[in-house]
Every structure is written in structure tokens, then in C-alpha cells.
Amino acid sequence: MTVTKGDRPAAATRRSRTVLVSFLGAIVRKMGNWMPIAGAVELLSEAGLDAPSVRTAVFRLKKRGWLVSESRSGMRGYALTPAALEALATGDEVIWHARQPADLGDGWCFVNFSVPESARALRHQLTAHLTSLGFGNIGSAVWIAPARMLPAAQRAIAELELTEQCAVFVGDYVAGQPLPSMVRGGWDLDGIDQRYREFIGEYEGEADRLAEAGVIAGTHAFVTYLSVIDHWRKLPFRDPGLPREVLAEDWSGPAAVRLFERMVTTLEGRALAHAASYWSAQPRTADRTDGRADGAEPLQRTS
């Protein structure tokens, strides 16, 4: 039986897209913001993606304005657009540092809005924006986050032209329902904590094995590094960075951050060195085991 593109499972299509975005952010930006399509397809096949899925994901990102066709040194490829670079840079602070716990003494930002049924799509967009910023829902159209999220909330509201439909407050918690209980009602903290624990469970043993290994093959470094990045980058966006006082004593976020940083330190240089060979029109040599490619420095984390 012939399987057409439309028959591919949606989950596989989504995975191809998320892995490609992780690849663009973690690898392609370090290679001059450009990738050779043949080399990228071959390289991503090592991470378990088939060529049709990669090409489909590239096509969709091109339609979104993230990629533009560009040939270099006789190789067909794609360059990252300013829109893509801006979007990737916006996520860097969260991805590489996670959300640091807010200071409880700084108070809270509250957003209340009343958007008519005729503007339901805008209402959904606003709630999606607030959720991605780390806001939790504690009542009918009432959203709360640490006070430091005020400027971001104001920008999101203004971009959707919903300023007249929203009321925004910043203040302290004074009395009433215990604060930890209110927080647990507003965020799926158990779900967030579980995702951190799953990350730890998946990669802690591998981190120990890598630390003991005398040699780490380039292919293994690249595949593991990309897997770690792709798994990790979704987690901090779900974490609102709540004050430590309102979280459980065994909150697993800090341990997950330490493991992520440990994996990056071990694998990043080797992964970039391995990937760099796919940017050349020359035949590749045997699998590299260590070292960095010329000009391929580690990703720079913003402070």
C-alpha cells in the first residue's frame, strides 16, 4: 500500500516541525543563519526524521516567513529571515535560563477582561497570550501572574487592540483563601512538575554515562543534544516562575535546570562540530568524536 503525505500521522508531522525549530535555533543560527537543504535532511535523518517530513516542515516554515530560499557555494538551501531570528531570540531567555522564581514581595499582576461573543477569536488569542506569559486563571476572565509580567501583559493586550476591554491591576495578596491553594487552582503545578520529572528521568542516566565515557561519537552527541533541546524548550514556557514560597518543597524545576545545563555543557561543542561537516560540499570523513568545528562557538546565552 502506498502511503501519501496526507496519511502521515499528525503527531509525526508536529514532531518534525518542533524538531526543525529546535534545529534552527540550536544549530542553524551558529552556522551563519543558513542551512543546505540536502545536508539538513541527511543530518536530521540521524535524529529519526524522514526526508519527506523534513521537507514538509521546511515548506511550512517558509510559508510562515521563517525561511527564504538561498544558495551558497553551489548548494541549495534556506536562510533564516529576520522574523525567524526575532522569534528565536525572544525564546532564548526562557529556554536557556528558565523562569527564575519571582519575588513574593513584588506582588501580583491581575488581568480582568470582558470581550464580547462577537470577538471570540480575539478572546481566545488573549487567553493564549496570557497563558504563554505564565498567567494562571483564578476566576471567570480573571488571570494572575507575578507582578514582573505587567509590561508583557500590557503589550499583549495592546497588540490585540483590547485595551478598552481589559482592566489590569498590580497589588499584594492580603487575606482570604490561602495563597498556595489559590496558586494551585490557577496553574497545573502538578502537571508542570511531572514534566520536569520526566525530563530528569529520561536524561539523568544518559548524563552520567556521558560523564564516564572516554569518547563521545559525533553522531551520538548531535542526536542527543538535539533531543535534549527539543524536549527542554517546551518546559520553561509552561512554568510561570512562581515565588518559591508557594511551591512544594520538592518542586523539581531547579533539578531539571541543573541537568539541562549539564547536558548542554557536555554535548554542545561536539554536536556543532558534527553538524558543521554537513555544511560543506566536500565528502564527509569518519564520525568525529570531539572538538568544535572551526567558527562554531557554543550558543550564547543572554543574561
Image: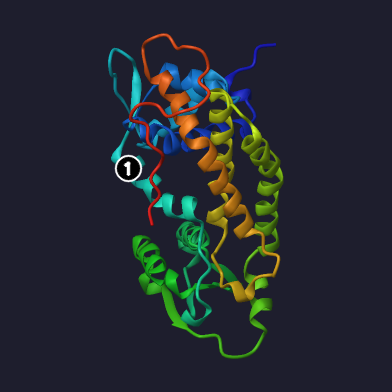
Quadrant of res 142:
bottom right
The N terminus sits in image quarter? top right
Q: Where 173 sits versus 197, above or below?
A: below
Q: Is residue 208 left or right of residue 277?
A: right
Total labels: the figure holds 1
Rendering coords of residue 295 (x, y %): 33, 30
Q: Residue at x 48, y 36 (%)?
A: 268
**Is residue 139 something one can see in this rendering?**
no
Q: Residue at x 51, y 85 (%)?
A: 172
Rendering coords of residue 38 (x, y %): 43, 16
* SS type, badge 1: helix
Q: Which residue occupies the foreground of this view, 34 or 282?
A: 282
Q: Residues within 10 Å of mark 1 (few under 14, many from 20)?
A: few
Q: Which residue occupies the foreground of this view, 60 or 89?
A: 89
User: Label 1 belongs to which residue?
Assistant: 83
Q: Residue furthest bottom?
A: 175
Rendering coords of residue 85 (x, y %): 34, 42
Rendering coords of residue 109 (x, y %): 47, 76
Q: Residue at x 53, y 34 (%)?
A: 19
Q: Where 147 sits versus 270, above or below?
A: below
The C terminus sits in image quarter? bottom left
Q: Is residue 62 left or right of residue 131?
A: left
Question: Amino acid type of disc 1?
Answer: Ala
**Is residue 264 something one can see in this rendering?**
yes
Quadrant of res 138:
bottom right
